[in-house]
C-alpha cells in the first residue's frame, strides 16, 4: 500500500491530520514550516519536531523528494526543460524561462492531456493521470534549484489542462501561497485554460487572487472546433460569457492567448473579428506563434496538425497593430526553448525526443 504524501495537504488539512493522530492541530504550523521553508526531504530532517511525532508521521505518510529525471538546456536562449518521472512511470515536464531580471517557471498539472488539441504535442499523447499537489509543488522546488533562485512568477501552462485537475491545482496554489510556507504571491501565479467554463466561473467567485489566461486560439468558432475538440463542449460564446463574469466579479483582466497560424487566422479580417469578440472586455492578448509539435509515435498528432504552419512575423506585427489600434493591449510573445521542444505546445513528457542542439545534463 502506497502511503499518502504529507505534502498533498493544505495547512488546515495538515492540522486535521495531526488531530487524527492525537496531536495538537497547532503543531501543523511547525511541520508546514519544515516542509516548505526548510525544505526537509525526510521526516528525520524536520528540525524542532519531537522524535515521537516524526515517527508517527513516517508511519502514516510518505515524504519523497520529487527529482527531475533529465535536464535539457537550450543553446539558443538558455531556457531549461526538466523531465519528471513519477513512481508509477507517469511523466511530466516543466520549463524555466530567464528574462532580463526575472525567472518564470511553467508547471504541468497532468501527465498527458485529454483535450486533444490538434496543434499540441501533449494532446497527442492522450491522458495518463492528474498530478497531485505534491508532484506539482515538487516541480516548483526543482525549478528553483535548477534556476539557482526562487522563481518570480509561475504559470500553469505546461502539460495538461489545469481546470480539469482543478482540485489539485487549487490546493497546490493554496500551499504555495501560504504565509507559513513559501508565501509565494498569488498575484504572480497564472493559470491557463482552453476554456473549461464551469471552473472559470468558480474561479471568479473564489477568493483566489491568481491571474486567468484563456487559450482562445482563434476568434472563429468553426475554425476553433477543428483545432480543439473542447470547442464542442464549451463553445467560444460560452467561454467569452464566463470571461466577462470573471472580469465583473474580480475586477481583473483576462489574458487571451491567440495561436498564430500561417494562412489560417492571420489576416486583418481575422484581427477585426477578434476585436469584435473582445469588445467591452477588460483584457490583454498574447499572440503566440504556432510551434510545430512532435508527439509519441502512433499518437495521430501528425495527421491532426497536417497543413498547420507557424505564422509569419510580418503578419503578426500587423495583426498586433490592428489590435492595439482597437484599444486592446497586445503582446507578441517571443518564443523560447524551441530547440529543446520547450516552447508552447511542444511538451511531450520525453516522448519522441531526438538528438537536437541542446545541452543534456
Image (cartoon, rainbow, N blue to C red):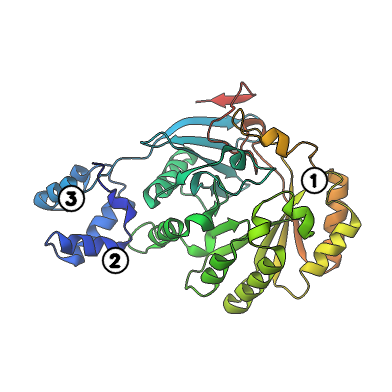
Hey, which quadrant is residue 307 in on the image?
Answer: top right
Location of residue 300 in the rendering, given as x and y in whole percent from the top left corner: 65, 34
Q: Distance of mark 1 from mark 2, alpha carbons?
A: 46 Å
Task: Name the residue carrying label 1.
Answer: 261
Name which residue lies at 55% across and 42% down: 96
Which type of secondary structure does the marked residue at label 2 adopt?
helix
Q: Dot 1: within a 10 Å radius of its alpha carbon, few (fewer than 14), some, or many (20 or more) residues?
A: many
Q: Between 350 and 126, which is closer to the camera in this rendering?
A: 126
Q: Name the residue under label 2.
A: 12
Q: Residues within 10 Å of mark 2 (few under 14, many from 20)?
A: some
Front residue of 251/243: it is 243
Work out whether 280 lies above or below 195. below
Say if mark 3 contacts mark 1, CB within 8 Å.
no
Residue 138, x across and y down, in percent: 40, 45
- Residue lying at 28% horizontally and 63% vertically, measured from the top left: 13
Residue at (81%, 63%) from the top-left corner? 274
**Marks 3 and 1, the one that precedes in the sequence:** 3
Determine whether 70 is above or below 236 in the image: above
Number of numbered discs present? 3
Is the Cβ of the residue at disc 3 closer than 8 Å to that at disc 2? no
User: What residue does disc 3 label?
Assistant: 57
Q: How far apart are marks 3 and 1 (CA)?
A: 52 Å
Counting residues from the start of the chain, the first of labels 3 and 2 encountered is 2
Amino acid at each position: 500500500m502506497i502511503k499518502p504524501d504529507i505534502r498533498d495537504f493544505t495547512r488546515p488539512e495538515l492540522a486535521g491530520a495531526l488531530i487524527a493522530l492525537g496531536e495538537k492541530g497547532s503543531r501543523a504550523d511547525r511541520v508546514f514550516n519544515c516542509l516548505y521553508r526548510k525544505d526537509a526531504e525526510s521526516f528525520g530532517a524536520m528540525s524542532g519536531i519531537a522524535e515521537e511525532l516524526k515517527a508517527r508521521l513516517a508511519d502514516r505518510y510518505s515524504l519523497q523528494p520529487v527529482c527531475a529525471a533529465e535536464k535539457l538546456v537550450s543553446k539558443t536562449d538558455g531556457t531549461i526543460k526538466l523531465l519528471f518521472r513519477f513512481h508509477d512511470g507517469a511523466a511530466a515536464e516543466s520549463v524555466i524561462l530567464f528574462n532580463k531580471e526575472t525567472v518564470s517557471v511553467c508547471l504541468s498539472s497532468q501527465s498527458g492531456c485529454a483535450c486533444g488539441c490538434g496543434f499540441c504535442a501533449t494532446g497527442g499523447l492522450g491522458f495518463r493521470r492528474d498530478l497531485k499537489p505534491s508532484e506539482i509543488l515538487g516541480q516548483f522546488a526543482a525549478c528553483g534549484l535548477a534556476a539557482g533562485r526562487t522563481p518570480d512568477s509561475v504559470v500553469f501552462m505546461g502539460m495538461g489542462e489545469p481546470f480539469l485537475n482543478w482540485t489539485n491545482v487549487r490546493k497546490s496554489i493554496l500551499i504555495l501561497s501560504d504565509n507559513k510556507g513559501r508565501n509565494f504571491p498569488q498575484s504572480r501565479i497564472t493559470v491557463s485554460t482552453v476554456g473549461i467554463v464551469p471552473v472559470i466561473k468558480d474561479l471568479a467567485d473564489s477568493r483566489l487572487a491568481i491571474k486567468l489566461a484563456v487559450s482562445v486560439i482563434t476568434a472563429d468558432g468553426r475554425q476553433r472546433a477543428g483545432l480543439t475538440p473542447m470547442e464542442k463542449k464549451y463553445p467560444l460564446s460560452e467561454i467569452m460569457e464566463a470571461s466577462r463574469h470573471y472580469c465583473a466579479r474580480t475586477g481583473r483582466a483576462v489574458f487571451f492567448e491567440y495561436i498564430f497560424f500561417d494562412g489560417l487566422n492571420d489576416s486583418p479580417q481575422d484581427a477585426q473579428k477578434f476585436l469584435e469578440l473582445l469588445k467591452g472586455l477588460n483584457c490583454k492578448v498574447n499572440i503566440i506563434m504556432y510551434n510545430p509539435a512532435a508527439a509519441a509515435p502512433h499518437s495521430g498528432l501528425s495527421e491532426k496538425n497536417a497543413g498547420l504552419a507557424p505564422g509569419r512575423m510580418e503578419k503578426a506585427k500587423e495583426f498586433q497593430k490592428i489590435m492595439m489600434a482597437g484599444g486592446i493591449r497586445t503582446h507578441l510573445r517571443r518564443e523560447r526553448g524551441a530547440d529543446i521542444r520547450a516552447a508552447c505546445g511542444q511538451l511531450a513528457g520525453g516522448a519522441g525526443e531526438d538528438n537536437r542542439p541542446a545541452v543534456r545534463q
